[in-house]
Image (cartoon, rainbow, N blue to C red):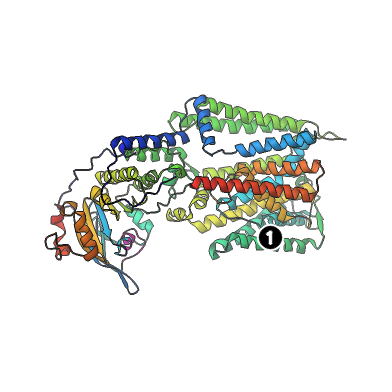
């Protein structure tokens, strides 16, 4: 199926202007649950038009971090800058209002509803209290087309009849439908076959090519290196590196994930301070 | 359906392009077979055939079952398909259909409401108490009060279920017992309260005149047919999923034919001493409730949210839907519809009495909804399923009465039919999950 999807080339990656204000900037964000320090002084930038992969071992704080961004948790300290302006994201609704959409690992789709119904769930278009089915169906079909999802023959198809990759595509399209600017994806390729993984990765790539910021949480080094422009490595609640993918290889990332340092990159300990603008250039 | 692969190895697996394309084509073909925008009648028939083969048989089993039941009982007793008995069957079945339409709201959530049998009794008792000579309320005031009491009961039960988080099974089981007690309390042991109001009694025993029957039927078919035609033509012209024009024409013609057949049956004289003919009022009541609940479930945000909660409550919650409110409303609508059924039941018996068996009624209602095609597991079901299932239950009940089987035998047969319907529902669900 992947052959039908995503006309964008996987390489080369587009490179935004070096002095651009990042779409999202976490500044010294910390979060503790009782005595457990889940996040400590995280300083992370998410540029628009790029895929940022968030990697780390279990318990490194990836989930807490994306929950802070999507409004499920509120940070204890630190600042979140959205397009350069400080914001407080207190609920998933607030995140959606800013243009931040999260695609959860379990996708949260209703099997008994069709694709269009799922994409508009909770935000249906109505005309005099009656659902405007035709308008929603057309908008859903247009969004799927713009994402080059062509394996779905009709948006009136029940989600129960879709494959894993198609379901992921619907969940992503649902996020895109609302003019979101940042899409967060939690393990989008877990539990997918080879062809379907390929399709989803192209979809992720095409989101970034449309100018959206994308955060992808993944355990799979193949996927990360195939799709990401930048990689941020978390370890025990701290951000140990955030670098363009060109400066890294899977072995370095695994080293960073497990030990917090890697002998193969220059000056790994000062990485936290050395990142920022020159990394993106 | 989704094949869960093993975690991928670190070495990239590079399947050939051809292989990928083949996989994609196979998948697309399968998907296309499920829903295809058929252009001609032939294609449409093919699509429907493929859909049935793939297990999505819609109302086909229940219609087939109804045919079988009709053939069976007709061969046993040639009175079964007589006009008089068919109208009788519709009037008897109306209570089951209305109760089942109420139960559908609970079933759609994946919950159950066991109390609606006795709640319908409460609706009947309140109405009867208010129209009796000594109270002297107008018939419409008494009915509104009866329905209001039922709606409040639904809100209370729904609130307990959703806000405290108790299982609906237990809360409504308490309701089943409690409201039976309340009925006994109001009517006194072995008590019965006759209804003398002509209009209320006419709900179940009054008929439209034959001429009025034709006029009402033509009006209903005209409205339904025009809507169907306009809507599907508009969808065709904008390139959305729609059946070909010939199929739309057939659907409109079938609606008209059904209307003509029903009116012809009802207009046949079924009286022994004085002529009785015309469509019973209760048929219009059932059609009215059917139209209202079909609209509510199919065309409004509320209905969409009910299906969403039944399909995946967590997804609905994340979509910002207020689960507690929608669930409470569903229990309210279930009890409200039960109230309508209770008033119709009282109208048929021209009285309310403590002989009302709310336990059997609620089981018949659940059976009717599930036989008609609603799922006990939530997320699937329509008001029309309740009506179809209600006809099946009424046909079994009526056919066995004609053969003068005992109530015990009827209970056993109905229980078996319910079990079979639930088994089919569970098997279909298991197949879908595979």
- Residue displayed at 42% across by 39% down: A155
Task: From the top left corner, tell me how far across and down residue B6 is, in percent.
Answer: 36, 51
Q: Secondary structure at mark 1?
A: helix
Q: Which residue is mark 1?
A: B176
- Quarter assignment of residue B65: top right
How many marks are shown on the rendered structure?
1
Report if residue A71 lies within the magenta region. yes
Q: Residue at x 74, y 60 (%)?
A: B183
- Residue located at (52% from left, 43% from top): B299
Q: Identify which residue, A188 or B235, lies in the foreground.
A: A188
Direction from residue A184 to residue B380 in the image, left or right: right
**Residue B286 horizontal/vertical position (percent):** 67, 42
In the rendered view, does A21 fall on the left or right side of B224?
left
Disc 1: which chain? B
First to last magenta residue range? A63-75
Q: Specify whether residue B380 is in view.
A: no
Considering only vertical position in the picture, is A62 above or below A150?
below
């Amino acid at each position: 199926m992947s052959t039908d999807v995503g006309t964008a080339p996987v390489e080369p990656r587009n490179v935004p202007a070096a002095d651009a204000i990042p779409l999202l900037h976490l500044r010294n964000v910390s979060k503790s649950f009782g005595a457990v320090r889940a996040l400590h002084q995280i300083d992370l930038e998410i540029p628009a038009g790029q895929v940022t992969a968030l990697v780390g071992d279990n318990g490194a704080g990836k989930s807490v971090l994306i929950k802070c961004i999507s409004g499920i948790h509120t940070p204890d300290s630190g600042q979140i800058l959205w397009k350069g302006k400080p914001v407080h994201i207190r609920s998933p609704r607030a995140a959606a209002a800013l243009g931040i959409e999260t695609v959860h690992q379990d996708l949260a789709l209703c099997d008994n509803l069709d694709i269009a119904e799922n994409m508009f769930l909770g935000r249906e278009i109505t005309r005099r209290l009656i659902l405007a089915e035709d308008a929603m169906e057309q908008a859903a079909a247009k969004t799927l087309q713009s994402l080059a999802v062509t394996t779905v023959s009709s948006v009136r198809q029940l989600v129960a009849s879709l494959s894993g990759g198609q379901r992921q595509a619907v969940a992503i399209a649902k996020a895109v439908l609302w003019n979101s600017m940042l899409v967060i994806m939690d393990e989008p390729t877990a539990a997918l076959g080879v062809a379907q993984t390929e399709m989803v990765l192209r979809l992720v790539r095409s989101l970034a090519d449309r100018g959206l910021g994308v955060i992808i949480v993944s355990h799979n080094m193949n996927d990360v290196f195939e799709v990401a422009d930048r990689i941020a490595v978390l370890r025990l609640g701290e951000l140990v590196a955030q670098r363009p993918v060109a400066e890294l290889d899977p072995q370095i990332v695994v080293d960073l994930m497990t030990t917090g340092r890697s002998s193969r990159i220059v000056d790994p300990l000062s990485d936290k301070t050395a990142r920022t603008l020159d990394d993106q250039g | 359906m989704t094949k869960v692969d093993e975690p991928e190895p670190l070495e990239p697996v590079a399947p050939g392009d051809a292989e990928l394309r083949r996989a994609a084509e196979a998948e697309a073909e399968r998907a296309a077979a499920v829903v295809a925008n058929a252009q001609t009648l032939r294609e449409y028939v093919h699509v429907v055939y493929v859909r049935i083969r793939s297990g999505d048989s819609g109302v086909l089993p229940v219609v087939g079952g109804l045919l079988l039941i009709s053939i069976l009982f007709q061969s046993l007793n040639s009175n079964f398909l007589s006009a008089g008995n068919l109208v009788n069957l519709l009037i008897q079945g109306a209570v089951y259909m209305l109760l089942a339409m109420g139960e559908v709201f609970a079933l759609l959530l994946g919950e159950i409401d066991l109390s609606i049998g006795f709640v319908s009794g409460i609706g009947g008792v309140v109405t009867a108490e208010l129209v009796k000579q000594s109270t002297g309320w107008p018939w419409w005031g008494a009915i509104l009060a009866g329905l209001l009491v039922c709606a409040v009961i639904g809100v209370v039960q729904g609130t307990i279920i959703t806000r405290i988080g108790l299982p609906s099974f237990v809360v409504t089981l308490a309701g089943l017992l409690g409201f039976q007690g309340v009925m006994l309390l109001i009517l006194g042991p072995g008590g019965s309260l006759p209804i003398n109001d002509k209009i209320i009694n006419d709900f179940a025993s009054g008929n439209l005149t034959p001429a009025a029957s034709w006029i009402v039927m033509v009006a209903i078919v005209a409205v339904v047919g025009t809507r169907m035609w306009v809507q599907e033509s508009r969808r065709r012209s904008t390139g959305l999923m729609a059946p070909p024009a010939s199929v739309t024409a057939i659907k409109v013609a079938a609606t008209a034919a059904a209307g003509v057949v029903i009116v012809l049956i009802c207009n046949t004289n079924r009286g022994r001493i004085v002529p009785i003919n015309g469509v019973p009022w209760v048929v219009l009541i059932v059609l009215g409730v059917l139209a209202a609940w079909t609209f509510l479930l199919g065309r409004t945000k509320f209905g969409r949210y009910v299906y969403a909660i039944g399909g995946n409550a967590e997804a609905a919650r994340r979509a910002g839907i207020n689960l507690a409110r929608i669930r409470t409303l569903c229990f309210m609508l279930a009890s409200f519809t039960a109230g309508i059924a209770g008033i119709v039941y009282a109208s048929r018996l021209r009285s309310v009495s403590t002989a009302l068996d709310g336990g059997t009624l609620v089981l018949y209602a659940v059976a009717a909804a599930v036989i008609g095609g609603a799922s006990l597991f939530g997320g699937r079901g329509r008001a029309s399923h309740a009506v179809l299932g209600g006809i099946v239950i009424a046909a079994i009940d009526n056919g066995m009465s004609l053969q003068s089987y005992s109530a015990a035998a009827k209970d056993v047969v109905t229980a078996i039919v319910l079990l079979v319907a639930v088994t089919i529902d569970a098997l279909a669900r298991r197949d879908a999950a595979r």
